[in-house]
Amino acid sequence: MPKHAVEANFDGLVGPTHNYAGLSWGNVASKSNVNAVSNPKEAALQGLAKMKRLADRGYVQGVLPPHERPHIPTLKALGFTGSDKAVLAAVARENPSILAAASSASAMWTANAATVSPSADTSDHRVHFTPANLSAKFHRSIEHVVTGRVLKSIFADDAWFAHHPALPSVSHFGDEGAANHTRLCSRYGEPGVELFVYGQVAFNEQAPAPAKYPARQSLEASQAIARLHGLKDSHVVFAQQNPAAIDAGVFHNDVIAVGNANTLFYHDMAFLEEEKVLADIRSRLTGTELQAVRVSSAEVPIEDAVQSYLFNSQLLNTADGMLLAVPGECREVSSVSRYLDDLVKGDGPITSVEVFDVKQSMRNGGGPACLRLRVALSDDELKAMHHGVLLNDALYERLTTWVEAHYREELSTEDLADPMLLDEVRKALDELTGILGLGSIYDFQI
Ligand SMILES: N=C(N)NCCC[C@H](NC(=O)CCC(=O)O)C(=O)O
């Protein structure tokens, strides 16, 4: 008997060091906003407002905490010595780029936190988690340790939940987590089809690959995760991302496609072999028909898709069709805005569109879908997880008050060397683990 299940969304709470350091070659927004002054307080409040709106509509909404940044243990591992203050002064003097990398609030994009396979798909009928090694970018490669701790602390009961360490941190097994993974199914509690999208075949130098920008996810990484999670071949599809899309700035598949339940919303340039991908999904999907909502390059050129982040939207079930939760930028790009108006007039599965303002995150290439990690949970699993991270009115109030108290309204890359910032961050995060009831998860607490 399939179990009743819901999709819970865990959004990353934006950290106090949110800034624009231009760290992500291949991510157009990150590069074009390099050295802009950020507003961490506004960023965190925008994220919380998105979570609150969705929680108010009845979706199960969770929060994942920011990581400790600047991360002094990373700097010490690179040979900077002495007190925390001395370490900051030395790295700021010798190599400010390393300081920026060790200070990024990039853990906010929790679509990259992990790959999650719901219990309906796995061989041992537990929910499986593998934190992403994010090995393509140094600033992100340091996330998986704390991400793993956080996930273990929230999903602690091993009768229901299984945790794997991140894959070997090298480009052959480059893994970007759920940003390159979509699950299609009839209902969340039924076995589904897990679609893994990769950018390169690491062990085959002759295979198609992007020419300009890096492919962050390898086929070998996706296959390893499918094995670790105990997914049957009959429930897995591996698809190569179109290298031309990566070269146009689509650094993750969730910048060009999003799936939910039986619906795949995607751009015609998303996949290298579009017809095969659809046929592979159709032949594995049970209990429903795939609804493929294809956006053509004639309707929305790929540059407009990248600029607006149309596909980095959340696709959510409603009582009456599906809701597409889009970033505000979609209304600023005329082809996309027109497309959205026509979309809801049609008779397809997407029946409503709502705009969310996450501009602070968007300037670093993170839209609504980047900010959330989806975890499909049966009623028993939902009961078994730690509830302190689930957003309700009281937690929303506490977190907004906490942000108001601890976050700066302006942060430039020069400010990252300020030792006061490190003290502010630690004080704030120490309080946060108390608010969320997570125990000691940060290195400075252990
Ligand atoms: N598509 C998804 N799921 N996530 C978006 C991640 C954006 C992130 N940007 C950054 O890391 C920029 C940081 C900076 O430049 O300061 C990245 O490129 O990995």
Image: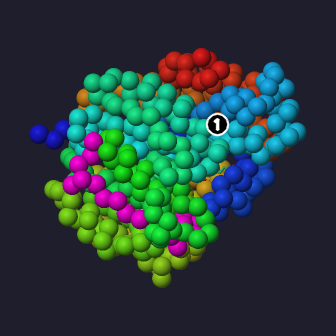
**In the image, is 243 to the left or to the right of 401?**
left
Image quadrant in which the N terminus is located = top left
- For disc 1, the marked residue is 15
For the magenta stretch, what is the residue range? 230-250
**In the image, is 331 to the left or to the right of 364?**
left
Q: Is residue 24 above or below residue 189?
A: below
Amino acid type of the residue that numbered disc 1 sits on in the rendered structure: Gly
Give residue 427's position: percent from left, percent from top: 69, 21
Disc 1 beta carbon < 8 A from ligand 1?
no
Give residue 17's position: percent from left, percent from top: 70, 38
Give residue 379's position: percent from left, percent from top: 25, 32
Q: Residues within 10 Å of mark 1 (few under 14, many from 20)?
A: many
SS state under label 1: loop
Q: Is residue 280 above or below residue 302?
A: above
Image quadrant in which the C terminus is located = top right
- Residue 5 falls in image quadrant: top left
> Which is nearer the eye, 186 or 197?
197
Residue 75 can be seen, yes or no: no
**In the image, is 136 to the left or to the right of 54?**
right
The number of numbered badges drawn on the structure is 1
Residue 115 included in the magenta stretch of the image: no
